Image (cartoon, rainbow, N blue to C red):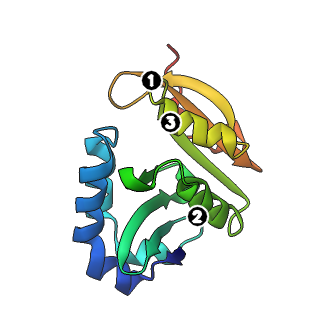
């Protein structure tokens, strides 16, 4: 398996295929807001700290995608092809990311047990319970040098 960090040019070229993969294999857990954010994400943002697109491939076959904006404060998602789940690919992408940044954040609806398992398995900490973009109770996770002060104040809508 090969993990690649996409350049601005690669992201621009493959954005459509990445969106197709995310929508097809995201098990309807990726919000419309997140999809819209990726569609509108300027490729130039990939040169800013804390914004990455990582892909895991086996040969020419896409196995997983990780997209994170502003350390996860804007958006963060991981989608793994169903045939590759439980193979550690999601954790490998996160490990790859955590070697490049000192902190990361992500939101997971509390009914999304596979994603919560992956976050806890990586040593992420549940730091805030809030209402997510779909109205579900959602946990903010942090990793590394996280701080509640980093999170957008609009995210603090207690349940």
Circle 1 residue: 111
Q: Position of residue 59 (x, y in %)?
A: 42, 81
Identify the residue at image location x=22%, y=61%: 20
Determine the image quadrant of residue 22.
Answer: bottom left
Is 15 on the left-hand or right-hand side of 96? Answer: left
Who is closer to the viewer here, 126 or 28?
Answer: 28
- Alpha-carbon distance for marks 2 and 3? 24 Å
Is 31 on the left-hand or right-hand side of 84? Answer: left
Q: Secondary structure at mark 1?
A: loop
Tell me whether the residue at label 1 lies in contact with that at label 3, contact meaning CB atoms closer than 8 angstroms.
no
Return the residue found at the far bottom.
9
- Alpha-carbon distance for marks 1 and 3? 9 Å
Determine the image quadrant of residue 41.
Answer: bottom left
Is 102 on the left-hand or right-hand side of 141? Answer: right
- Alpha-carbon distance for marks 1 and 2? 27 Å
Q: Secondary structure at mark 2?
A: loop
Dot in front, 1 or 3: 3
Identify the residue at image location x=53%, y=47%: 86
| Residues packed near mark 2 inside 10 Å, few (<14), some (14 to 19) or many (20 plus) | some
Q: Which mark is residue 50?
A: 2
Note whether residue 149 is visible. no
N-term mark: 2 or 3: 2
Q: Which mark is residue 114?
A: 3
N-term mark: 1 or 2: 2
Q: Position of residue 148 (x, y in %)?
A: 68, 36
Position above or below: 86 against 114? below
């Amino acid at each position: 398996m090969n993990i690649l960090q996409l350049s601005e040019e690669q992201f621009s070229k493959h954005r459509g295929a990445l969106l197709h993969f995310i929508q097809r294999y995201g098990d309807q857990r990726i919000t419309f807001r997140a999809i819209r954010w990726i569609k509108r994400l300027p490729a130039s943002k990939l040169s800013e700290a804390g914004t990455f697109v990582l892909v895991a491939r086996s040969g020419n076959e896409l196995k997983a995608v990780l997209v994170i904006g502003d350390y996860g404060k804007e958006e963060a998602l991981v989608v793994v092809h169903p045939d590759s789940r439980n193979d550690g690919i999601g954790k490998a992408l996160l490990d790859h990311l955590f070697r490049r940044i000192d902190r990361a954040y992500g939101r997971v609806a509390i009914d999304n047990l596979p994603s919560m398992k992956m976050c806890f398995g990586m040593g992420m900490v549940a730091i805030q319970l809030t209402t997510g973009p779909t109205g579900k109770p959602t946990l903010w996770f942090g990793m590394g040098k996280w701080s509640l002060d980093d999170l957008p104040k609009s995210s603090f809508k207690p349940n």
